[in-house]
Amino acid sequence: MLDKVKELHQEIEQYTINSPEQLEQFRMRFISRKGVITELFEGLKSVPPTDRRAVGQELNGLKNFAQERFESFSQQVEEQQAATKNVAPVDLTLPTIPNLTGTQHPLTLVRQRIIQIFERIGFNVADGPEIESDWYNFGALNFPENHPARDMQDTFFVEKASMDTDVSSDMLLRTHTSNVQIRLMERQKLPIRSIMPGRVYRNETISARAHCIFHQVEGLYIDRNVGFKDLKDTLYHFVKEMFEPGTRIRFRPSYFPFTEPSAEIDISCQICGGKGCNICKHTGWVEIAGSGMVDPQVIANCGIDPEEYTGFAFGMGIERITQLKYVVNDLRLYTENDVRFLRQFEGL
Ligand code: DAH
């Protein structure tokens, strides 16, 4: 029996293991209840009682030795396996990886807020083309050809009018959303009470203050007996809903070819509260929109009788309103897709 123990001890000592299968063979032979060591323990009964204690000790020693080797072999196999898979063993106690969802773009947030404010007072949302004819972008809005008002809105021309191609008016990227006013007045049943958000283009050198792509929201209200008071009430309401309580508003006489009279709308600077800063050029006021009573000629250009119908219109820049609401001082941030900027609007 002792010889057998010695023999098995040697066998275990020389054992090497390189795979889970070999580990299992080792377990079956030395550790399991059907293994050789258990078998020897069973043979202990037939050892003379005087020797039993000594032999038993030897057997226990062998059993412990086999168990130790088995544990170190197990660990070795586990490490080998992890290394070949090239992954760390799974740690189920680690925190989960957060699921990063996207955020809405600040311009989208502000556009939606503008729409919400006007929808609640009965305006619907309308849309028009970004590639537009000279007539809808300029002509119908009372910008005569060669009129200096066109200089303020240089743009990208896509196609020249020509007899050969059947294009009767130059095609261009629209410089404002005012083109949609004309399309609505031509097509829609009166009265019209709509806002028209969209992208517009100008031939500008890109800087912190100017961009060749930006966004506007146009507003148009045409009905019998619409007056300047309605324009003021509507925009007062908008400013009150959109900006901080206590924001002041003023109408400043201005000129647009398609409105008469025309006014620019200023609000007290949201950044400095009207004290004067870089954003308001130290005047305490910032312009947020152009507006006016729709020129009777423009109404007539769309086949509506200006003796019977009147209306007001306004157009505001979404970037400007976003700048004032969230203190965004560089227009380029809106189109750079830098997540450090975009993430700041998370949860709004
Ligand atoms: N379209 C003008 C611009 O982009 C803004 C504007 C002024 C729109 C007066 C209007 C308006 O509807 O009535 O500069």
Image (cartoon, rainbow, N blue to C red):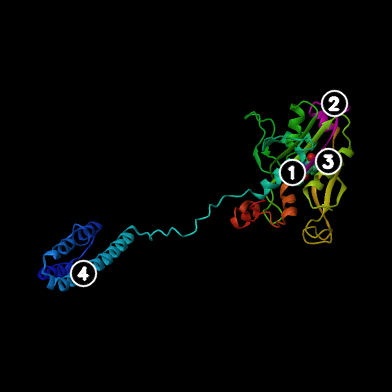
Q: Are marks 4 and 2 in contact (CB under 8 Å)?
A: no
Residue 109 to residue 300: above or below: below
Of the image marks 2 and 3, the number of the one nearer the N terminus: 3
Total numbered circles: 4
Q: Is residue 287 magenta?
A: no
- Cα separation between marks 1 and 2: 30 Å
Q: Secondary structure at mark 3?
A: helix
Residue 334 percent coordinates (x, y):
65, 52
For the residue with label 1, is its CB less than 8 Å from the closest atom of ligand 1?
no
Kind of residue at disc 1: Ile
- Cα separation between marks 4 and 2: 112 Å
**To which residue does mark 1 refer?**
114
Side (left or right) of 264 relative to 95: right
- Cα separation between marks 4 and 1: 84 Å
Residue 40 percent coordinates (x, y):
15, 64
Depth order, front residue of 34/137:
34
**To which residue does mark 3 refer?**
234
For the residue with label 4, is its CB less than 8 Å from the closest atom of ligand 1?
no
Q: Residues within 10 Å of mark 2 (few under 14, many from 20)?
A: few
- Residue stretch rendered in magenta on the structure: 297-316
Q: Are marks 4 and 1 in contact (CB under 8 Å)?
A: no
Of the image marks 1 and 3, the number of the one nearer the N terminus: 1
Residue 279 percent coordinates (x, y):
77, 58
Q: Secondary structure at mark 2?
A: loop
Q: Secondary structure at mark 4?
A: helix
Quadrant in the picture for the N terminus: bottom left
Of the image marks 4 and 2, the number of the one nearer the N terminus: 4
**To which residue does mark 2 refer?**
305
Q: Look at the image and tell me whether residue 50 can be seen.
A: yes
Task: Say the numbered circle drawn on residue 60.
Answer: 4
Q: Residues within 10 Å of mark 1 (few under 14, many from 20)?
A: some
